[in-house]
Amino acid sequence: WVTAKGEICHNYGYTGGGFTSTDDNNFNTQLQRAINDSTGDRAKLTGQIYVIDMLNDVRGNTDISTSAKNFFAKAAKAFPNAKIYVIPVLFNENDLNNKWDYARNCSSFTNIIKSAGEPYGALVCEGSRSWFHNGKNDTYFPPSAGVHFATAGYEFAQRQFDNWLEGGSGWVDYGWHNLVSGANLAKVKNDNMLQSYVARKGDIIYIHGTFSTVAMSAYETIFNLPAWARPYRSMYLTAWNGTTAWPVIVDNSGALVCSNNLADNSTLALNGSYAIF
């Protein structure tokens, strides 16, 4: 991918690691290898530094602030003419990643990277955490890959990164999707009131619409949302009829469920948003 862009690649990330990994393979150690290897004019001629994937930090749940600040300061000093690009995290939907703490770290650690890199002009592709949030995908990340990816997955990430480099937002967004395809038609009436929609912008999900039901018990499913709208822990939206408002719940399987018993011929509206990460 790098050589196809006309660049000469020097890869120092081959041992994995992250900002807070062990001394033999963390990002600062990898950077020091690059510095030691950059003899003569090579340091001055280095044009790009790519920092890719702090998944080990996300899953390790360890503060990256000091290590990240040291990294950017050292990189800027050693390679004064290089632009620093960061893909914060490639986060797939393997079961090993299905934890709210990890999802939250994807967002909060990206904030730390943006702050640490800003004084040195680092450019951070914040939307990378959204690239693979669309259900399980055996082509991109088969079970045997665990939290990592098959070649097709890395190639997909390359295309998303190229789109960002060319001026795109860096996010994988989804426009308004009609929830009739996910309605629990045993409980939700397929009539003119079934006008409910969901969309994703960045890592925020937006839902609004109306629907009617037959009698429902609390915690029965109203809609099954698309995989790209699934949160990592239960989120709450407001639903109401002509006189009363109450919460509905989007659970971490992506099911939108009622929190109250509903009488036959209930007509409801709902509107709200929540963050995935």
Image (tube, grey):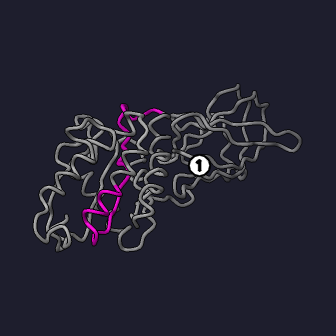
Residue farthest to the right, as pictured: 243
The residue at 57%/46% (across/down) is 275
Q: Nearer the viewer, residue 214 or 41?
A: 41
The residue at 35%/57% (across/down) is 72
Disc 1 is placed on an element classified as helix
The stretch in magenta equals 72-99
The residue at 14%/60% (across/down) is 10
Which x, y percent locates residue 238?
Answer: 74, 42
| 207 left or right, relative to 85 | right
Which quarter of the rendering shows the N terminus?
bottom left
Q: Is residue 89 magenta?
A: yes
Residue 106 vertical placement versus 175 (above, below): above
Q: Which residue is mark 1?
A: 180
Q: Nearer the viewer, residue 229 or 40?
A: 40
Q: Residues within 10 Å of mark 1 (few under 14, many from 20)?
A: some
Residue 229 vertical placement versus 214 (above, below): below
Residue 169 vertical placement versus 263 (above, below): below
Q: Amino acid at mark 1?
A: Val
